[in-house]
Image (cartoon, rainbow, N blue to C red):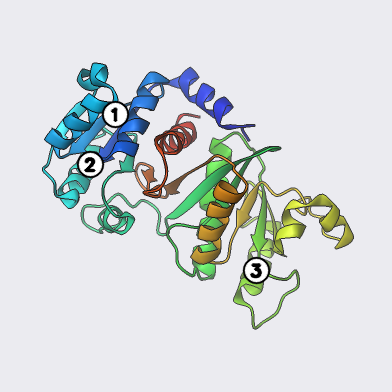
Amino acid sequence: MFKNFDEMKDFVKSRRRGRAVIAAAQTTSVLDAAILAYREELADSTLVGDKAAIIALLEELAPELISKFEIIDTGADPLAAVHKSIDLAHEGKADLILKGKTESATIMRAVLDKDHGLRQSEVVSDVLAYEHPDGLRLMSDGGVNLCPNLKEMIAIVQNSVKTAHGMGCELPKVALLSAIEVVNPKMESTVNAAIISKMNQRGQIPGCIVEGPLAFDGAVDMEAAKLKGLTDSGVGGQADIIIVPNIEAGNLYGKIVSLYCGYRVAHFVVGTKVPILIPSRADDGENKMLCMAMALACMVR
């Protein structure tokens, strides 16, 4: 796994410059991301949306770079911008789609549309990376699946493992979180975790080491893992990937590591023809640029 986001960006720049498409780009933070990605030689951007509003913002932010961006006018309707962005992906003109001035639900409905969307896997999921002092760590799913069943949890694990491989971790250690570390039939998360762990042991989920159920301390703290006798699998105390039981836990996890711990974070949706980036409206341009870099890193390896 990359040690930090700077190492990840250097990796992307050593391969090739990407092409980002920004849906409904008439908002400051995504234009900041496009400007940063251009200046850092990570990606060029196609800006889709209200052309007049986009140009007005660029004149304030970086007037010298206006000519460096392709701008496609779809008016002020965000859904029109989303549909055009999806068209560009189908035409091979997008390495990723970044959400601009539109709701995550709006862009995901269009992306998952059976007739014109970009779904490639039966289950898509959001994978988040955060810059822990000991290296990048992954968490899923805090953005797409509300309360995943066993089948969906298996796919979330597989999507996360695929992402870890793309970020340079050949055999990621995956912790399936719950409140306790024994199977309780009344707690679905413990039952699912035990089944998935056994599937991994029998080769049904390759390319990783899976352990669960694990409480958070047993997954990330070696002293706690030793005290609880959770070190045999190699996951306890040193997980590379945290899998949470539901979207509430994932949403809280992502905001806590970002706002309380102060870690830099990035994330994108896996399982689509091109990565879909649905950062929060509150995220700044640097965060959204890091989401672009993470998606590109997983594509070019």
* Residue kind at label 3, given as amino acid type: Ile
**Neighbour class for label 1 at 10 Å: few (<14), some, many (≥20)?**
many
Residue name at image x 17 percent, y 29 percent = 55
Say left or right for 170 vs 146: right
* Residue kind at label 2, given as amino acid type: Ser
Residue name at image x 77 percent, y 54 percent = 236
- Residue corresponding to mark 3: 195
Residue 45's label in the rendered image is 1
**Mark 2 → mark 3, Cα distance in angstroms:** 39 Å
Element carrying mark 3: helix
287 and 219: which is toward the camera: 287
Residue name at image x 48 percent, y 32 percent = 297
Label 2 or label 3, whichever lies nearer to me, is: 2
Residue 209's label in the rendered image is none
Q: Going from the N terminus, do you reach mark 3 or mark 1 first?
A: 1
Element carrying mark 1: strand
Q: Is residue 228 visible?
A: yes
- Residue corresponding to mark 2: 85
Where the N terminus falls, by quadrant? top right
**Residue placed furthest toward the top:** 64
**Mark 2 → mark 1, Cα distance in angstroms:** 12 Å
- Quarter of the image for residue 24 reads top left
- In the rendering, at what x and y percent does residue 120 appear? 36, 51
**Neighbour class for label 2 at 10 Å: few (<14), some, many (≥20)?**
many
Say left or right for 204 vs 70: right
- In the rendering, at what x and y percent does residue 265 appear? 53, 42
Q: Going from the N terminus, do you reach mark 2 or mark 3 first?
A: 2
- In the rendering, at what x and y percent does residue 221 appear? 78, 52
**Mark 3 → mark 1, Cα distance in angstroms:** 43 Å
Element carrying mark 2: helix
- Quarter of the image for residue 30 reads top left
